[in-house]
Amino acid sequence: GEGAGPKRTALAAAMALAEEIGRGGPLALQLAKEAIESGAGLERMEEALAVEDACYRRILPTKDRLEALAAFAEKRTPDFKGH
């Protein structure tokens, strides 16, 4: 029917976004998910931002973060190892 076109388009867009997100660093994705899940139920924005900041600080010392920065500077695809 008429709804099949927009539904297919929305599904294709969602799948493309999922693939793009899936190419991200596994640690960064894990911590982003943690920040979203932990911060979503908080009433105050300051509390949610504190959760996000805590997750971000856990990424800073990782090799994957350094790989992301190097890959960006070198204009290449990052090779994440999950540490």
Image (spheres, rainbow, N blue to C red):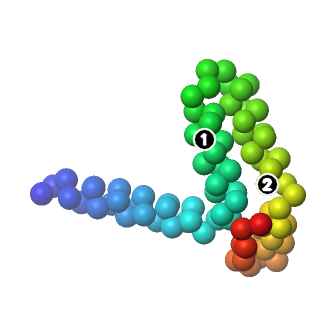
Tell me where residue 51 appears, x and y as whole percent.
Answer: 72, 36
The part of the image, by quadrant, that contains residue 65 is: bottom right
x and y percent of residue 56 in the render?
A: 77, 47
Which residue shows up at 75% across the image and 45% down it?
55
The three-letter code of the residue at mark 1 reads: Ile
Question: Can you tell which quarter of the image residue 47 is in?
Answer: top right
Asked where in the image residue 37 lies, by quadrant, the reply is top right
- For marks 1 and 2, give the CA distance: 15 Å
Residue drawn at x 57%, y 28% is 41
Residue at 84% from the left image edge and 54% from the top image edge: 60
Q: Point out which mark residue 23 bears.
A: none
Give whichever of 6, 83 is nearer the camera.
83
Quadrant location, the C terminus: bottom right
Where is the N terminus found, in terms of image quarters?
Answer: bottom left
Q: Is residue 73 visible?
A: no
Type of amino acid under label 2: Ile
Q: Residue furthest front?
A: 83
Q: Is residue 23 visible?
A: yes
Task: Identify the residue shown where x is 79% and y is 54%.
Answer: 59
Depth check: give the residue in front, 23 or 27: 27
Residue at image mark 2: 59
The label number, if any, that marks residue 36 in the structure image: 1
Direction from residue 29 to residue 59 in the image, left or right: right
Q: Is residue 72 left or right of residue 9?
A: right
N-terminal label among 1 and 2: 1
